[in-house]
Image: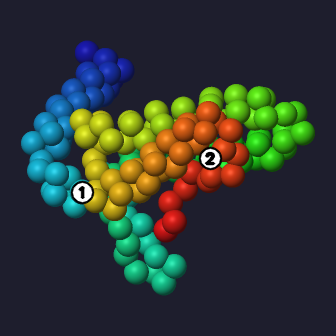
Amino acid sequence: MSDIDTKTIEIGLKAEQEKSQNNDALSNIRRMTRKDYIKYTSLNYHTVGWNGEPGLKQSYEARLIFRNIGYIEKYRRYLLNKHKDLGKEYLADINKRIVDRIVRFIKLYQDSTKCFQTEIQNTAAEELLYLTQKIKMSGYYDFNTQIETKN
């Protein structure tokens, strides 16, 4: 066998070993308790307070969902402010499209099969959902309510 063939076989074997190890790790993750999952450092995000102290732990998926809600809300407020001269019907349409999208993100977080949840984030999700419902109940004509938590 040539050196190239030997090298190709070694690379292939190494890839198979890594794949096997990854499957074992994934299998172990699926067997974890919820408490162990949030403790497992490679699976969660540890917040750090302004004072450098460790803060809340949250899953990466929860962090992404809440961050996206924040970005979408900032964009909604930007659009409502930028286009305030185009009339209430137009603004209500903007509100409907964006608020409904935010609700979809909240529902994604609330699906415990897809996202690890904590009590604090559950409270935040309920608060955000309440604010979206407030806007919906106005027929999407509430342009002042901000969809964000108080914390």
Seen in the picture, residue 118 relative to 50 is either above or below; the reply is above
Residue linked to disc 1: 38
Tag nearer the camera, 1 or 2: 2
Rendered image quadrant of residue 106: top left
- The answer to whether the residues at label 1 and label 2 have Cβ atoms under 8 Å apart is no
Q: Residue tagged by mark 2?
A: 73
Residue 46 place in picture, x, y as percent: 37, 64
For image coordinates 9% across by 42% down, the residue present is: 31
Left or right: 102, with 145 as reference point? left
Identified at 77% across, 29% down, the residue is: 89
Q: Nearer the viewer, residue 64 or 21?
A: 64
Q: Residues within 10 Å of mark 1 (few under 14, many from 20)?
A: many
At horizontal 68% and vertical 38% (from top left) the residue drawn is: 141
Q: Quadrant of residue 14?
A: top left
What is the basis of the colouring in this image?
A: rainbow
At horizontal 38% and vertical 72% (from top left) the residue drawn is 55
Marks 1 and 2, how far apart in space?
27 Å
**Vertical placement of 13 versus 105: above or below?**
above
Q: Is residue 120 left or right of residue 149?
A: left
What SS does tag 1 mark?
Answer: helix
User: Alpha-carbon neighbours of circle 2 within 10 Å: few (<14), some, or many (≥20)?
Assistant: some
- Work out which residue is located at the far bottom of the displayed protein and give it: 51
Tell me the amino acid under the disc marked 2: Glu
- In the rendered view, tell whether residue 137 sits above or below residue 36: above
Residue 77 visible, this angle: yes
Q: How many marks?
A: 2
